[in-house]
Image (spheres, grey):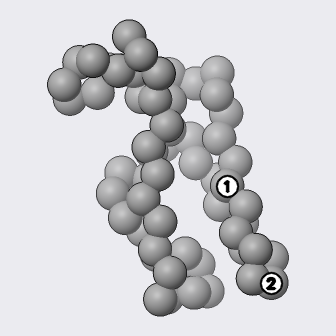
Amino acid sequence: MKNVEMKVEGNILTIKVDLTKDFGPSSSGKTIIIASTEGNVVVDGHEEAKIGLNVYRKK
């Protein structure tokens, strides 16, 4: 994962992303990647729950 912090407290998933980060252009080159789970990942402690997150901005 790039710049994604996830925390589970009880039944609540909290996602934290630093919006000042920059991981370069997307594969299409149209956007700049800020954060990504790089595909779908399992939520810790909740094997039935998955998350796929991409945060980006226009180039």
Does residue 55 lie above or below 50 as drawn? above
Residue contact between numbered discs 1 and 2, judged by CB atoms under 8 Å: no
The residue tagged with tag 1: helix, strand or loop? strand
- Looking at this view, name the residue that lies furthest to the left: 28
Does residue 57 lie above or below 50 as drawn? above
The residue tagged with tag 2: helix, strand or loop? loop
Does residue 15 lie above or below 22 as drawn? below
Query: Residue 15 at x, y = what percent?
Result: 67, 55
Does residue 52 lie above or below 43 as drawn? above
Residue visible at 58% across and 24% down? 21
Mark 1 / mark 2, whichever is N-terminal: 2
* Image quadrant where one finds the C terminus: top left
Residue visible at 49% across and 37% down? 55
Residue type indicated by callout 1: Ile
> How far separated are the C-alphas under marks 1 and 2?
14 Å
Residue identifier under label 1: 15
- Looking at this view, name the residue that lies furthest to the right: 9
- Residue 43 visible in the shown view: yes
- Residue neighbourhood size for the residue with mark 1, other residues' Cα within 10 Å, grouped as few (<14), some (14–19), many (≥20): few
Question: Is 58 situated left or right of 25 in this image?
Answer: right
Q: Which mark is residue 10?
A: 2
- Residue 25: name its quadrant: top left
Q: Which of 12 and 42 is in front in this view?
A: 12
- Residue 23 visible in the shown view: no
Residue visible at 23% across and 18% down? 29
Query: Residue 34 at x, y = what percent?
Result: 50, 30
Query: Residue 20 at x, y = what percent?
Result: 64, 21
